[in-house]
Amino acid sequence: MRWGKRAAVAVVGVAALLTASACGGSDDGGSGSTKVEVFTWWADGGEKAGLDGLVSQFGKDCAGQEFVNGAVAGGAGANAKTVLASRLQQGDPPDTFQAHAGAELSDYINAGQVEDLSADYDTWGLKQAFPPGLIQNLTVDGKIYSVPANIHRANVVWTNKKVVTDAGITSDPTDLAAFIADLDKVKAKGVQSPLALGKDWTQLMLFESVLISDLGAEKFTGLWNGSTDWAGPDVTKAIGDFTKLLSYTNTDRDALDWTDAEKLVMDGKAAYQLMGDWEAADLDAKGFQDYAWFTFPGNGTTFQWLADSFVLPKGAKNAEGTKCWLKTVGSADGQKAFNTKKGSIPARTDAAPADYPKYQQAAMADWKSATQVPSCAHGSACSQGWQGAANSAMGAYSTKQDAAALQKALAAAAQQFAKK
Amino acid sequence: MRRLRHWGPGLLLLSPSLILLAVFVYGLIAWTTKVSVSDEHTALGSKGFVGLDNYTNLFTNDIQDRFVHSLKNLAVFTVVFLVGAMFFGLLWAFILERGVRAEGFFRTVYLFPMAVSFVASGVVWRWLMNPNMDDNAGGLNAVFVAMHLDFLQSAWWTNPTWGMASMAIPAVWQLSGYVMALFLAGFRGIPHELREAAAMDGASTYRLYRNVIFPQLTPVALSALIIIGHMSMKMFDLIMSVSGPQWLTEVPAIYVWQSLLTSDYAKAAAISIVLLLLVAIVIVPYLIYTNRVEKNS
């Protein structure tokens, strides 16, 4: 009897545990649906507002299709990318997902996880609507894989007007020498670190701007496609110029994120900060009026762009719905609905500037006429692995200041990651 | 049949956890090992077997010796963390054991930090260890300036050589109380007769602790070392919240995460296995030792 009781308890216990674990199975799916799951990391703020604008436009353009929000919040997209990677590996892709346009997509393209959209670009007339420089940067081996929803500019210097005027500076510098002279003037007024800077990726942004000044747009783009040598003397010179600029920055840069550095400018503890043009929306949101901006000195008419874009993953459950979403994203109405709320500019050149705030109007005018170059810090110039290696090299340089080691590391990274 | 009756039900009851362990611990270790000897460096998947290349590359061919640098960081962090937590843990346990008023109160105060997650305390310590100095000083540096102890100001974790020692301060703060609790239990576990016998023999207080009490605390000290030692080697959350992922404070666990984010699965797996071996070097002898002790008793 005793044996029987013990055995019964054991069997029931095991059965209960196994049933419990069997219940963890998945129950989503449903092929041939009219749902479009849009996977982004836009969960709040201006980004969420922009997405909402896009969704309402989608509702008008694509009657019968239903939008499903697949946003994963946090970590500036890092969390979302982790979730996305595992879903793609399991062969369970969302109907479309957000990715930085350009080289960051190359990981997905090489893995055969996204579809070629070149034919749709022709049908939707996007090749005429987007500037040729952007089309050229987006094209990989003759094919285009994503539709950019917006454009941001990376090579912009933001200034605290009062600090700059107090230093007796009346015009914006147009080359590095003039910029350094201005930095000296501000420093002479008792501002210890006139150029605000943050941790590794913001340092990479600054270094990329210096590279554009020293190498020019064409050779700069060549750094990322393998046609310009990272070990060359012009890169050495750029590292020298970058080091000179570092001497004007705050020593606690590695402890700061870009918003902390922005605060130094707002508080008048720094005069300048190089940052992407999302800073305009952020400064407006924080109620700081006294700011101005200019293109990084020496960049001329170069527009260093980055863009959020959407793709059509292989094996999407509702490819038709996704294509309608992508069409909306690329359309004039869709771009207006998204960008007026997010604080970026449309990738299309036929948008009406009157719909946009002051900074965006200036950027839109530049976008039409400028030379487009991509950005590694924001994934349009280099793959994620390359970006990680570059950030790490910049972080090491910030503390060790070993110029030869930096150049060697960047050259090694290019060798490892640039397409042969 | 009779023997089956004897251990059959027990085995059946254990089987769910045995199966789960086999699949989710040992199975996954085996799978990680397999990935670590493949060339799965992109989302494309693996093309083949590369032997130990991923491991040798980590040590000899990593850009800017990134992996070796992360190991150095981990070494500095672990030494400071272990020495600090053991020292303060033993000190507090000793003081409480000597009998102070409101022992319960102090015990709680010392133990409390352990209840806070590394993420929450990391955010606070990020503010406290603000590396700005003098006019711009914040956090602890500002306190030092206000007290006219300017020379005490520090660059904290942004110091390229000894920054990881500062990074260990929050960990020491958090785990010392736990070590104290372990030691206190050790002190209380020593029979009173031993102290009386030592007193009868005319031993001084120093001799009592040196020759009677401390030797009996060796197993406790070993347990404490192992527990916080393996925590230290896997440290991730604290560093992520104090400095974020960056070269300066990178340790192997963070490097794994960074490699995974860039789809370099083979590299991430190789670092994970190195980390596992590091922890095993510490844990396995300990397990053998405790097994032997338990068998003997």
Image: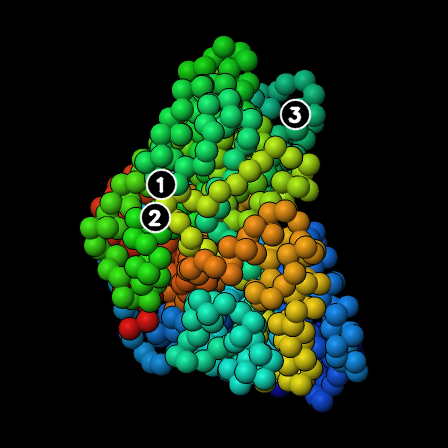
Viewer-closest of A308 and A177: A177
Q: Quadrant of the N terminus of chain A?
A: bottom right
Q: Dot 2 corresponds to which residue? A: A213
Question: Residue B242 in the image: x percent, y percent?
Answer: 52, 40
Name the residue furthest top: B148
Q: Mark 1 highlights which residue?
A: A175
> In this rendering, which labeled residue sits more in front, label 3 or label 1?
1
Pick out the residue farthest to the bottom.
A32
Q: CA distance from mark 2 to mark 3?
A: 62 Å
Position of residue B208 relative to residue B172, above or below, is: above
Which residue is the site of mark 3?
B106
Which residue of the protein is positioned furthest toward the left in this rendering?
A: A233
Query: Is residue A65 shown left or right of residue A404?
Result: right
Q: Gap in Å between the C-alphas at discs 3 and 1?
A: 63 Å
Where disc 2 sits, the SS reads helix
Label 3 amino acid? Phe
Residue B230: give x, y in percent of width and height.
Answer: 46, 49
